[in-house]
Image (spheres, rainbow, N blue to C red):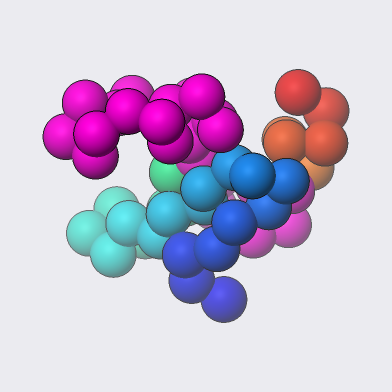
């Protein structure tokens, strides 16, 4: 699984770093060049766990 959305969060796969970069729903309202990631994860499961505990 690569880039996906979960509970309105964007979990974007970064090919260069080989990690997922997480953006909150609020960040997704910003233009792409103006967004700041909330967290980074190694796996899709870690992304979902982080979002569920946020």
Residue at 43% across, 54% down: 12
Image location (x, y in percent) of residue 11: 52, 51
Queried whether the magenta region covers residue 38, the answer comes back as: yes
Residue at image x 51%, y 24%?
26
When the figure is inspected, residue 18 is found, relative to residue 20, above or below; the finding is below
18 sits to left or right of 53: left
When the figure is inspected, residue 34 is found, relative to residue 16, above or below; the finding is above
Q: Residue furthest left?
A: 33
Q: In percent of the image, x 83 and y 28: which residue is there?
A: 53
Residue 35 in sight: yes
Where is residue 18, by image quadrant? bottom left
Q: Is residue 37 left or right of residue 52?
A: left
From the image, which quarter does the C terminus lie in?
A: top right
Position of residue 39 in the picture relative to residue 30 (left or right)? right
Instruction: Give the image quarter of residue 49.
Output: top right
Q: Tell me, yes or no, if residue 40 can be seen here.
A: no
Determine which quarter of the picture holds residue 4. Answer: bottom right
Question: Which region shows up in magenta?
Answer: 22-48
Asked if the stretch drawn in magenta spans residue 4, the answer is no
Residue 1 image point, x, y percent: 57, 76
Residue 27 drawn at (x, y percent): 43, 27
> Is 24 or 30 nearer to us in this picture?
30
Residue at the spot 73% in from the left edge and 46% down from the top edge: 7
What is the residue that sits farthest to the bottom in this orientation?
1
Horizontal and vertical percent position of residue 3:
47, 65
Q: Is residue 38 above or below residue 1?
A: above
């Amino acid at each position: 699984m690569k880039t996906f959305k979960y509970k309105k969060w964007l979990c974007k796969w970064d090919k260069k770093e080989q990690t997922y970069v997480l953006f909150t729903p609020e960040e997704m309202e910003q233009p792409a060049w103006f967004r700041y990631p909330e967290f980074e994860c190694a796996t899709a499961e870690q992304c979902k766990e982080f979002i569920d505990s946020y």
